[in-house]
Image (tube, coloured by chain):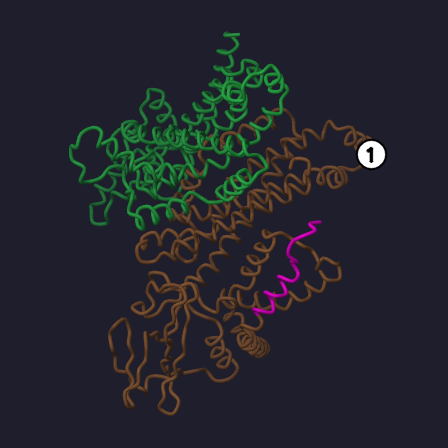
Chain colours: A green, B brown
């Protein structure tokens, strides 16, 4: 059993890495065949042609494409993805500065999404085919159609402007001096509430739908009836039987969704001015910072692969029989 | 057939009649313009072709569609489809389509028209301003061409019109007139303005949904934004449909190697946040309406490909398909009689959802400043620019935001309705 699990893991890991590799090569060539050179940003019309030529050469973009690709591969193998043009730092250092925030933000949002989706679904199921159920279903259906940038702008309008409760952008207040650790954490949290709510509102309806169906399906299974007939309390059935059984089918989607979150934070980060990976990637793209673009793509693709594999592993841990599904 | 609901034909008829009554003068004027144009074509064909610009063609299209509409309605009536009833989603979809078709006649304004910003800047909805008309001495050409150009200037709205002067109010003091513009009083020389026996001609202009920071009419921009969104959605979905179906067929009917290659290629795109890919391509190759359409079209084929591939692979082993092949049906007949009807239902549902996704993606891209560009009004860019005037203009974010939500809700509901119609068991 254990052997097969490692085998499956390895197989999936290798095939995913191949996909990531092809993707990176694709982006590498796409960036290079595009019109315009990143060096042009650093050459003003006034400087001498010799200096301009020197600057152009310093970007190493004059070699033929295969040569550039080969040197990119050689360097990438040793973990060197080049220097960012805008930050003048190694790409991985730049990403390292932005990644922790993004991962934390995505994980918090993910947790909020799953928990509130599940809570809504549980409440809706408890009051099935009554007012609360249909109201929750309708609200979630409408929420599903509201894009995050509309939600974000409205949230800022209501909570930052009209009510004046929460800060509208950034990750920490400017005037925050050393007021102690707790005040600092509080400040961070206050800045995170709106972005998390904004991003979570787009995900909650999907989880609600999945969990609502899956809870209903689980309750209709025969083992629940058997448990009831042997006198197990409703609370215990729900907590230790229904929850684990209804979570498993959603996990496969959750893995993909968590991976996607690392990419879809772009818009939320732009609205709320947060220092995250998505905004870094967009800025790198707009500044033609090619090494940083490739680095960001690599990291987000790897995060996606990792979250998929982790989700699969968790579902296998919950239900050992699912190994066959993961195998294929 | 849905039993209860709103009659689509009646909705169309009401919209049609309302437009006809509200813009009757414009239709008459445009008919005269068309008459001049036909005359010009008869006498001077080359200059007639030269005068046919995008705006005029746009008006002409809407004008002809307006006369084609009754024919269509009568046809529907004959087919007894006039009594078709639909839910709220169909009604909104009909209204949106109507807006897209007759945009120039509905708004009677140019989306980029701006004049006298001190008066028209950031006006709340339903505010009213005064228009005076400046006298412009024109060296008009003689003959039919001159008539045509004069009429064209009158009917077809431009992004700039030097005759119009917006004012907060115009007051008469004795036989002198004063124009108030943004708190500044200016003497008004009667010689320069259109007047009738010494009395200045002024009309009231109501900005139905207010104006933005450049004094442009929000209602007009919303209508043209609807147009942009729907056109981008339509073409991009069409590209994804073509690509998805072709690749799906190749993957489904091809051998193991082809199938694996195409599936892996699709997976590769799915394994990467698509919005970053789209932003990358748009910023590399420049963003314009055509690149947005192509990029969104090329980034949406994976779902379609998967569905078609799945259906085709399942179909290949079905008994009736094998029998039909062995009976001796030609490949063309097999395709049209056996394959297409089976795959059409899931594909249609997917197309509708994909349409919603593209509209969402387009507004998200415009929101990030990578949409069709400043030349076109777009919901996303309106929302984005409205964000900066959050404190002074709530309508700048509320209206485009609501429209985006309503459109997406409609697309999702229609997709759900179609899928419900074909697979009633799942609901």
In the image shown, does B385 or B410 lie closer to the viewer? B410
Q: Which residue is mark 1?
A: B328
- Can the viewer see residue A312 in this picture? yes
| Occupied quadrant, residue B427 | top right
Q: Work out whether A113 lies above or below A34.
A: above
| Occupied quadrant, residue B79 | bottom right
Residue drawn 34% across the image and 40% down it: A194
Residue A133: horizontal and vertical position, in percent?
54, 37
Quadrant for the C terminus of chain A in the image:
top right
Residue at disc 1, secondary structure: loop
Chain that bears disc 1: B
User: Which portion, as a residue range, is magenta?
Assistant: B1-19
Q: Main secondary structure of the magenta part?
A: helix
Residue drawn 51% across the image and 74% down it: B47
Q: Residues within 10 Å of mark 1 (few under 14, many from 20)?
A: few
In the visual, does B350 lie left or right of B83?
A: left
């Amino acid at each position: 059993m254990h052997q097969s699990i490692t085998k499956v893991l390895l197989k999936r890991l290798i095939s995913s890495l191949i996909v990531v590799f092809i993707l990176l090569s694709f982006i590498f060539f796409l960036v290079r065949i595009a019109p315009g050179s990143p060096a042009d940003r650093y050459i003003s019309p006034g400087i001498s042609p010799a200096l301009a030529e020197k600057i152009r050469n310093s970007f190493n973009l004059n070699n033929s494409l295969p040569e550039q690709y080969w040197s990119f591969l050689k360097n990438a193998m040793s973990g060197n993805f080049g220097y960012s043009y805008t930050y003048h730092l190694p790409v991985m250092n730049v990403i390292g500065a932005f990644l922790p925030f993004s991962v934390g933000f995505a994980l918090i949002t993910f947790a909020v999404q799953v928990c509130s989706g599940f809570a809504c679904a549980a409440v809706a199921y408890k009051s099935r085919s009554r007012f609360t159920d249909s109201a929750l279903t309708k609200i979630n259906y409408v929420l599903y159609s509201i894009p995050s940038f509309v939600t974000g702008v409205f949230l800022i309008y209501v909570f930052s402007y009209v009510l004046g409760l929460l800060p509208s952008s950034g990750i920490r207040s400017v005037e925050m001096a050393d007021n102690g650790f707790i005040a600092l954490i509080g400040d961070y949290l206050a800045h995170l509430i709106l972005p998390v709510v904004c991003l979570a509102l787009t995900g909650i309806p999907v989880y609600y739908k999945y969990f609502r169906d899956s809870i209903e399906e689980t309750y209709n299974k025969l083992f629940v009836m058997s448990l009831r007939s042997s006198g197990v309390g409703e609370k215990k059935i729900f907590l230790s039987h229904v929850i684990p059984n209804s979570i498993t089918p959603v996990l496969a989607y959750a893995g993909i969704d968590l991976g996607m979150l690392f990419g879809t934070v772009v818009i939320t980060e732009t609205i709320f001015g947060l220092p995250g990976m998505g905004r870094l990637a967009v800025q790198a793209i707009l500044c033609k910072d090619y090494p940083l673009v490739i680095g960001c793509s690599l990291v987000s693709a790897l995060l996606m692969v990792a979250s998929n594999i982790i989700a699969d592993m968790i579902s296998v841990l919950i239900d050992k029989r699912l190994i066959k599904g993961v195998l294929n | 057939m849905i039993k209860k609901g709103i009659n689509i034909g009646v909705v169309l008829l009401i919209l049609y009649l309302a437009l006809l009554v509200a813009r009757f003068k414009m239709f008459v004027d445009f008919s005269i313009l068309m008459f001049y144009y036909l005359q010009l074509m008869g006498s001077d064909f080359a200059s007639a072709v030269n005068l046919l610009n995008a705006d005029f063609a746009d008006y002409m299209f809407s004008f002809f569609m307006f006369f084609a509409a009754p024919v269509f309605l009568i046809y529907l009536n004959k087919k007894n489809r006039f009594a078709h009833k639909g839910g709220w989603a169909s009604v909104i979809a009909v209204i949106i389509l109507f807006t897209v078709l007759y945009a120039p006649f509905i708004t009677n304004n140019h989306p980029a028209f701006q004049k006298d910003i001190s008066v028209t800047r950031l006006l709340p909805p339903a505010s009213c301003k005064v228009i005076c008309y400046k006298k412009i001495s024109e060296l008009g050409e003689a003959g039919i061409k001159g008539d045509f150009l004069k009429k064209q200037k009158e009917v077809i709205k431009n992004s700039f019109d030097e005759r119009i002067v917006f004012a907060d109010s115009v007051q008469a003091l004795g036989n002198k007139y004063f124009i108030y513009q943004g708190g500044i009083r200016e003497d008004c020389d009667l010689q320069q303005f259109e007047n009738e026996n010494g009395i200045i001609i002024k009309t009231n202009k109501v900005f139905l949904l207010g104006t933005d920071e450049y004094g442009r009419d929000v209602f007009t921009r919303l209508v043209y934004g609807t147009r942009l969104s729907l056109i981008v959605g339509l073409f991009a979905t069409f590209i994804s449909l073509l690509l998805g179906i072709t690749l799906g067929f190749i993957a489904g009917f091809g051998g193991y190697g082809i199938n694996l290659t195409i599936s892996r290629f699709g997976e590769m795109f799915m394994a990467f946040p698509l919005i970053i890919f789209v932003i990358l391509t748009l910023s590399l190759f420049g963003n314009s309406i055509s690149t947005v359409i192509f990029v969104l079209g090329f980034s949406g084929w994976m779902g379609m490909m998967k569905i078609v591939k799945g259906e085709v692979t399942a179909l290949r082993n079905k008994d009736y398909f094998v029998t039909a092949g062995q009976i001796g049906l030609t490949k063309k007949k097999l395709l049209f009689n056996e394959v297409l009807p089976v795959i059409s239902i899931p594909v249609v549902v997917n197309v509708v959802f994909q349409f919603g996704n593209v509209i969402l993606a387009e507004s998200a891209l415009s929101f990030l400043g990578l949409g069709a560009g400043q030349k076109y009004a777009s919901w996303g860019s309106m929302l984005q620019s409205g964000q900066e005037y959050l404190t002074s203009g709530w309508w700048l974010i509320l209206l485009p935001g609501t429209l985006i939500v309503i459109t997406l809700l409609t697309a999702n509901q229609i997709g759900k309705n179609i899928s419900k119609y074909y697979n009633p068991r799942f609901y």
